[in-house]
Amino acid sequence: MPPLPPHDSLPPRPPGPPAPARHHRVAVIGTGAIVTGSHLPALRAHSSRAELVAAVDVDQGRLDAFRQLAGDLAGAEVAGYTSVDAMLDAVRPDLVLIGTPPSLHREQTVAALKAGSWVLCEKPLTLSLAEYDEVAAAEESSGAYASVVFQHRYGSGAVHAQRLLASGELGAPRVAHCQTTWHRDADYYAVPWRGTWASEGGGPTMGHGIHQYDLLLRLLGPWTEIRAMAARLVHDTESEDVSTALVRFQNGALATVVNSVLSPDEVSRIRIDCADATVEVTHLYGHRNEDWVYTPAPQVTAERVAAWRAPDTDVPSSHTAQLGVLLDALDKGVRPPGSGPDARATLEFAAALYKSAFTGRPVHAGEITPGDPFYQAMHGDHPHWAPKERA
């Protein structure tokens, strides 16, 4: 038998299969419509990477119904708990999905972080910047991360538009419009936790329009100044039912932002006019590639326009899309998008809008700090907007 060739002369070994993604154990807190209708389908779509092992709800009947549904879909039993702490102690999940009313988000998020679990929480993650900074402190001490559900960022159309804008391919952004003009009736506000500062942190500025202006901030980058107005025109609520704002961005662009629950013709829309093109997305609760339209300026060549074509893969904006990105970060042990300073910037925008609307003066980025009443609460203890004592 001839001798073997030296090691460095051997042909390279064929690469093996990629390392499999980790399989993560997931728990949900809250088993209402948002979890059943959005988080559960997202978990099913990522079943090769994530397994629902536990659910928490204070309503035993609702919990039992959810466990039956989730177990039937997953083919495995889902443990049920009526206490968050009991679930965290017993299960120690890798990831916790939170779909409870907003007033519970901070407490439940901090508890999960302290248990070492990552969190994906419905918006708003907290009711104030002060609460958000409590979450940030819990992240730092635990090493885990908390993300906010801002699913519109993660559709392929939004990712594509952000890349075109960031690269300068569309030219300098100049004028933008962001509208969330929806309709909610009195029955909507009959739910006890809706319409109060203590339960929701605000009106459509916090609970409805936040998805659209989060995407606007993702597309245009940091803002520098905001001038706003808000009103209660129809609903008997503590918070506003409509708000408007004029916004100056760091790149020089000017934008209008409208958040309404008074609009019979419901639409969600962002339009950005740049030097070389207008990019616009129009939808209601979620967008696909076809919802994004690019209109070139007269001087733009057909070759450039062809490069703006939407990607071949169409990923709708959804909880499924965001969960996939979060699981990628969890696999790598790195901070996910939609968390930390990134998500805090969106909450700061809301606080600044309220402060400008209620004080009647412009607010600049970074000015709301500890000691400012709008740091502690979105109403800023303003005499015409702060909650009244109830008999």
Image (cartoon, rainbow, N blue to C red):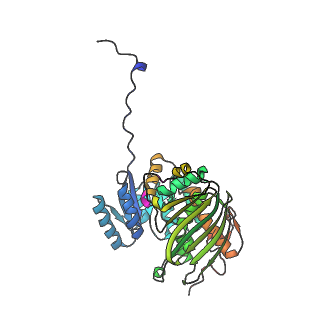
At horizontal 59% and vertical 56% (from top left) the residue drawn is 341
Residue 38 shows in the view: yes
Q: Is residue 301 magenta?
A: no
Point out residue 181 in the picture as x, y percentages from the top left corner. Answer: 53, 73
In this view, the residue in front, 350 or 304, is 304
Is residue 132 visible in the rendered structure shown here? Answer: no
Q: Position of residue 255 (x, y in %)?
A: 64, 65
Q: Is residue 49 left or right of residue 309?
A: left
Secondary structure character of the magenta stretch overall:
loop
**Most foreground residue, 97 or 33:** 33
- Measured as percent of width and height from the top left, residue 11 is found at 39, 23
Q: Residue at x 54, y 69 (%)?
A: 209
Q: Is residue 314 magenta?
A: yes
The residue depicted at 69 percent of the width and 59 percent of the height is 252
Kindly indicate the quadrant of the structure image that contains residue 42: bottom left
* Quadrant of the rendering where the C terminus is positioned: bottom right
| Magenta extent | 309-320
